[in-house]
Image (tube, helix red, strand yellow):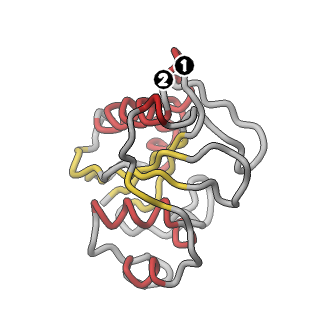
Amino acid sequence: MILIAIGANLPGKDGMTPLQSCEAAAASVRDIPGLSFVAQSTWYRTQAVPVSSQPDYCNGMIRMAGAGDPAGVLRVLQEIELRFGRERSVANAARTLDLDIIDMNGMIRATPDPVLPHPRAHQRAFVLRPLLDVAPGWRHPVLRQNITTLLADLPPQKIEPWHDAPEANGV
């Protein structure tokens, strides 16, 4: 099971809303050669972590299957981010698109990039709640805790289904 988190909180190229960018990026992720699509989560509106004055994020998760090379999959994800206007500046900066490998077939690796499982996934509702949609039986490969326990242990974090129309998103 390959879990890929998708998020955006800035307008993308050609004026795409964060939701539109996430939906288009999800289509690109589903088409990664050598991997096959399994499931996609609901889209969620989430607050930036750490909390800041940034606009809310649109976040979701895609579950893929396959045995891709982590560095190769990361390279493809970064190419998709670039196509959507991603610019890397400071840590936790607002972004037009963010794609992260959360887990790749239970692999544990500290180096080289990508670190697996994602080192902060278990601390973030915007990762864990959409992950629950696509892989309810998932267990953190290092912590050995199931997803419901990880969610229950989180401090309060704003997360809700993304309901409103793109023009009402405050972006």
The mark lying in front, picked from 1 and 2, is 2
Seen from the viewer's position, the closer of residues 27 and 170 is 170
Tell me how far mark 1 sits from mark 2, CA to CA.
Answer: 6 Å
**Residue 140 placed where, x, y %?**
43, 76
Residue at x-position 36% and y-position 46%: 163
CB under 8 Å between discs 1 and 2:
yes
Which of the labelled discs sits on residue 13, or is there none?
Answer: 1
Q: Which residue is label 2 attached to?
A: 16
Q: Is residue 122 above or below residue 79?
A: below
User: Could you tell me which quadrant the N terminus lies in?
Assistant: bottom left
**Residue 56 placed where, x, y %?**
57, 47
What element does badge 2 sit on?
Answer: loop
Q: Residues within 10 Å of mark 2 (few under 14, many from 20)?
A: some
What element does badge 1 sit on?
Answer: helix
Residue at x-position 47% and y-position 41%: 72
> Amino acid type of disc 2?
Met
Residue at x-position 51% and y-position 84%: 153
Q: Residues within 10 Å of mark 1 (few under 14, many from 20)?
A: few
